[in-house]
Amino acid sequence: MTSAPDPAVPATGRMIRRHALSTRLWHWITAVSVIILLGSGLMILNAHPHLYWGRYGANFDPAWFHVGWVFEGGRVPGWLTIPESYNLALARQWHLLFALVLAVALLAFMVVSLVNRHFQRDLRVRAKELAPRVLAHDVREHLALRFHDPAEPRAYNIFQKLSYVAIIFIALPGLIFTGLAMSPGMNAAWPWLLDVLGGRQSARSIHFILMLVIALFIIVHLALVLLAGVWNEVRSMVTGKWRVPE
């Protein structure tokens, strides 16, 4: 005698609802904003392609990073910047506009996710998930290109949780606050912000490092989407519907 299937466990190939509308909207608004912020930020970096620690930073101060170490000619090439040709004023306009869009979208997403319990239900990291045995198991599953738990396919795995928590609660807010710290207008309102960050040049360096972290996250995220199945993953972030893989 066979037992009846558990209705709580979606069968392989079954279409399930995976992402709420608020998550999908925030995902796409943030994706567009971050791409424009990366491109315009690199154009702004071209205006002075050196990074320093401390309060001042000038041509004769020791820089810890030069764009010339990465790109020949000491400038970020136009195919990576917004706009493509050198235009610092336009790059700043794009950067400030989409920084505001990013900040408002992140705040709205956080409020909605607290109300609908998305954070508590889907992103809460439990102590047992950090056990070495569990982490090693998830590493083996990733290497075998198995990215979900067959018994609970809606659930995020521990590496998804850790990366999303780091981006949502550390990297993006850090990017926003270091950007605010570099604004002369915000310096008058929040003079303590530069003191906390160690000075304007330190804020600029931290801003750049966080940008690299987010860029690396995007690269890994896109690679995993390709490995997991582009159509299924993109459809889930457009319609909310996701087919449980075999």
Image (tube, rainbow, N blue to C red):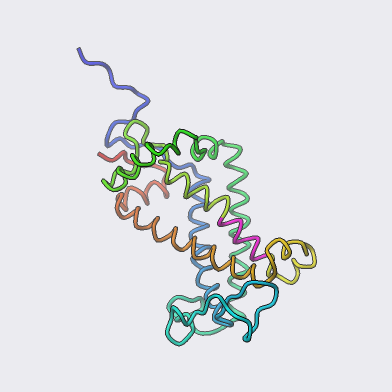
- Residue farthest left in this picture: 1
Residue 176 in magenta?
A: yes
Residue name at image x 49 percent, y 49 percent = 164
Percent x, y of residue 130: 45, 39
Place of residue 31 in the rendered image (x, y in percent of width and height, measured from the top left): 48, 59
User: Splitting the image into 4 quarters, where does residue 149 fall?
Assistant: top left
Residue at point 52% right, 57% down? 29
221 sits left or right of 29 in the view: left
Predominant secondary structure in magenta?
Answer: helix
Camera-nearest residue between 86 and 120? 120
Quadrant where the C terminus is found in the figure: top left
x 60%, y 46%: residue: 110
Quadrant in which the N terminus appears: top left
Q: Is residue 65 above or below residue 128?
A: below
The residue most toward the right is: 188
- Span shown in magenta: 171-180
